[in-house]
Amino acid sequence: MGVRLTGVTRRYPGLVALDAVDLTIDDGEAVAVTGPSGSGKSTVLHLIGGMDRPDEGTVEVDGEELAPRRLDAHRRRIGFVFQRFHLLPALTVLDNVLAPVLPRRVDFDRRARAMELLEAVGLAARADALPSELSGGQQQRVAISRALVNRPGLLLADEPTGNLDSATGREIIDLLLSLRERYGMTLLVTTHDPEVAVSCDRIVRLRDGRVVADEQLTPATDVFDRLGGLRP
Ligand SMILES: Nc1ncnc2c1ncn2[C@@H]1O[C@H](COP(=O)(O)OP(=O)(O)O)[C@@H](O)[C@H]1O
Ligand SMILES: [Mg+2]
């Protein structure tokens, strides 16, 4: 799923969080959004994820402008990963992965999908554990599985390594990149960590709500070739 922001401005009382931002992300790209604290990184993700609305400008995802009345349906098509995992402490690992599809009936296919995702992040053996029994890196892996349960075409990750040591953070970004290829998704990740940023295809740098640099690291044709085989 591609993304296009056109002239996007988001204001809060006394400040401009995003100032007429134009940004196009191609289907299948892995893009890092970097910049100092308060530069607007999370705001960009929230707007694309339909959790916030621009004051001016348009946000298009998969070729369609986000319509206020259809934001719920939009959010179900997108995966979201947060810095602080946000797992439900009373639910098992497997039930946390299934949480986005509750309270609808959890049929055999959904349970199989959740187990496949836990397998993909290396945690199938911990399906019955509680989050408190897992390390931070393992909890983030569960959160990543949960983000993929609805088969999103776009995965948004807001500082997914921000609460982890650098070796674990490295594992998490490598996992996100490999899942992006395996499931043919677009990946958008905000980060403070230069090592995380350089492992993406492209780095977009924000400052005071504006795009101040946009650096392509992987040629766009390579991104297309790598993902081409996964397209239906
Ligand atoms: N709900 C809010 N109310 C008021 N100001 C906000 C709110 N959310 C974000 N901001 C402000 O908008 C700016 C950009 O925030 P954010 O996108 O969270 O930056 P980043 O993720 O890069 O740290 C900051 O100055 C922040 O304080
Ligand atoms: Mg932020």
Image: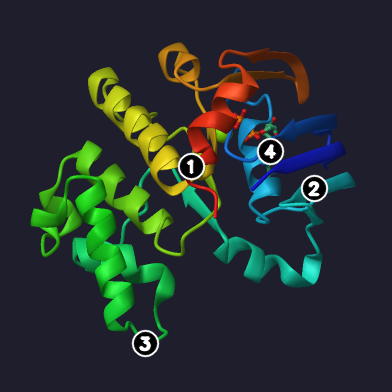
- Tell me the mark number nearer the camera, choosing from 1 and 2: 1
Residue 44 is marked as 4
The answer to whether residue 49 is left or right of residue 200 is: right
Labelled pair 1, 3 in contact (Cβ < 8 Å): no
Q: Name which of mark 1 and mark 4 comes first in the sequence.
A: 4
**Is the residue marked by circle 1 packed among few (<14), some (14-19), or many (20+) residues within 10 Å?**
few
Asked if ligand 1 lies within 8 A of label 4, the reply is: yes
**Is the residue marked by circle 3 packed among few (<14), some (14-19), or many (20+) residues within 10 Å?**
few
State the residue position of label 3. Answer: 105
Q: Name which of mark 1 and mark 2 comes first in the sequence.
A: 2
**In the image, residue 142 above or below residue 74:** above
Q: Name which of mark 1 and mark 3 comes first in the sequence.
A: 3
Image mark count: 4
Q: Secondary structure at mark 4?
A: helix
Of residues 210 and 23, the one nearer the viewer is: 23
Q: Secondary structure at mark 3?
A: loop
- Tell me the mark number nearer the camera, choosing from 2 and 4: 2
Residue type (three-letter) at the residue carrying disc 2: Val
The answer to whether residue 158 is left or right of residue 221 is: left
Quadrant the C terminus occupies: bottom right
Labelled pair 1, 4 in contact (Cβ < 8 Å): no
* Residue 230 screen position, x and y as percent: 48, 46
Q: CA distance from mark 1 to mark 3?
A: 33 Å
**In the image, residue 74 above or below residue 14:** below
Q: CA distance from mark 2 to mark 4?
A: 10 Å
Q: CA distance from mark 1 to mark 4?
A: 30 Å
Residue type (three-letter) at the residue carrying disc 3: Arg
State the residue position of label 2. Answer: 59
State the residue position of label 1. Answer: 229
* Quadrant of residue 214 within the rendered picture: top right
* Residue 23 screen position, x and y as percent: 77, 31
Q: CA distance from mark 3 to mark 2?
A: 33 Å
